[in-house]
Image (cartoon, grey):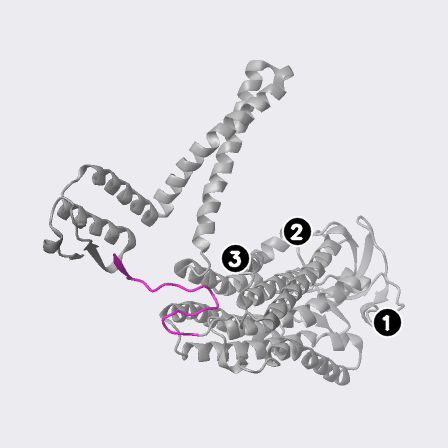
Amino acid sequence: MGLHPRQPSVAAAGTADAATGATSTGLGHDAHDLRWDRRWMVLVLAVSGLAVALSVAFVWLHVAGPSDGARMQPGRRTWAHGGVVVSPLVTRPGGLASGDVVVAVDGRPMRAWEQGLVAPHAPHPRWQVGQTVTYSVQRHGRLLDVPVRLGSYPWRGLVQQGWSMLLYFLVFALVGTYVFIRRPADRAAKVLFVSTSTLLAANVVWSFGLQVTDITGGVGFWLSTTMALVVNPICWAGFLHFVLLFPRVHPVLAGRRWIIPSLYLVAFPCSLVSLAVFRAMTPGTLDWLEPWGLGSNTVILGYMALIVLVLWSNLRAPLGAVAHQQLRWIVFAGLVSGAGDLMLWILPASVLGHPLISLNVLGLVLLPIPLALAVAILRYRVFDIDVLINRAMVYGTLTAILGLGYAGVVLAAGQLLGSDRSNLAMAGATLVMAAAFQPARRHVQATVDRRFNRRRYDAAKTIAAFSVRLRDEIDLDTLSAELLAVVDQTMEPTQVSLWLRPSAPGSSGTRRSEARPTTWTY
């Protein structure tokens, strides 16, 4: 039986359609490349682990340490002349207000605190939760002394002001992690994992924003600066590397192994040059810290421009139909979200000192990028993510049902047997749930397929009905027609042909000399 599928087969991410002969993202399987792949794996895990560790350290510093309930708003110009501009996460009567410029803490000017950031032996206070610290602030042109009682970090205010950004980073990280788990040997998957994990790590720290206590203590400031000037460029270099590998290995990489290391390393001399230029142009440490964000944004804009150029060249390349469709999803989302990010956040923040939208709106603007990547994977089954979703739904529902059933049986048996026989009730409930596992799994699987995977459910029903019919039908022509109909319904080919082998010599029925191959076309 010959089958001609209606839809082209889909290659794994990093490979193009076999019919087009496009290049795979793999670079060979000789001994040298195998050693290189092992080094890649170690490097991927090391970079991602280090970025996540720094992010966790920053978050833990805020969880375990005291907080004044305010932060330096991300994306805004917060390094003012003689102090820093803060925005409270929670409003406290008599406390800090939005737009306050903190010029001194505990009687020590902010300039002295900020100079202590680069002084190796500068004193750093060790404040505790519940302690009251006096902030000198400029508010509406007046200098005020505000007593600030240090407490725990206001998580609720952070989530309310930046929930969509946290969702965006989390979705992106989940997509990259899943791709890496499914294809750990694929270089594009490794690069995507590095990019998404560093994106999550760097931007969680960025979303927190700095507090005054991070400047007076020093550790929080340098953790945040490391994420902004080191980890964030690695993230964007990784995205550029990814589009050079997916959905094809870009021709610019052919025979030029130096390009990939250069992508990651070029950001650091650029950042150092910008810091040196800003240091020469500013009179003091406080004025020098202000334009650091501008230098970081300039590096990011450079990477974004290169990513757009690579995507454009990939769109014009002779790729397979599936690869082009995947690329269109990503390019469309990237153009929409990238243009919104550039016009509403990056440029206004660099020129005006503040963006035109809030953090929550920015998260919604950027969310189409990971969603488009997920849609491309779901729609074209690049990594069989539909199998994972199906199993997650089945076993998640099964776990909930068995857990509730276990709790119900234990409670009911406990009431019947008494509290002194609770162990017996638990053992009985365990046996009941173990016996119910397979029947419950089959029932849940059928329900999920019926509700969310109609093609598989209908195909299974069609094949089961044909199996019953096969036992009763004896007419060859009828069976042939029904077989072709079942194949058409379940596999959806463009054409299917059935060839019937002639009868063997001496067998009953048509003589061999009279037998003819019969071809049916549906």
**Image location (x, y in percent) of residue 134:** 82, 58
Indicate whether residue 15 is drawn in magenta.
yes
Amino acid under disc 2: Trp
Q: Is residue 140 visible?
A: no
**Image location (x, y in percent) of residue 318:** 39, 78
Q: Label 2 belongs to which residue?
A: 155
Residues drawn in magenta: 1-22
- Which circle marks residue 350 in the picture? none
Circle 3: element type: helix
Amino acid under disc 3: Arg
Question: Quadrant of the rendered structure where residue 43 is?
Answer: bottom right
Mark 3 / mark 1, whichever is N-terminal: 1
Q: Label 1 belongs to which residue?
A: 119
Q: In this view, does 479 lie to the left or right of 87?
A: left
Circle 2: element type: helix
Amino acid under disc 1: Ala
Tell me the chief SS of the magenta region.
Answer: loop
Residue at 78%, 65% in the rendered image: 215
Which residue is situated farthest in the left direction here?
514
Residue at 22%, 41% in the rendered image: 470
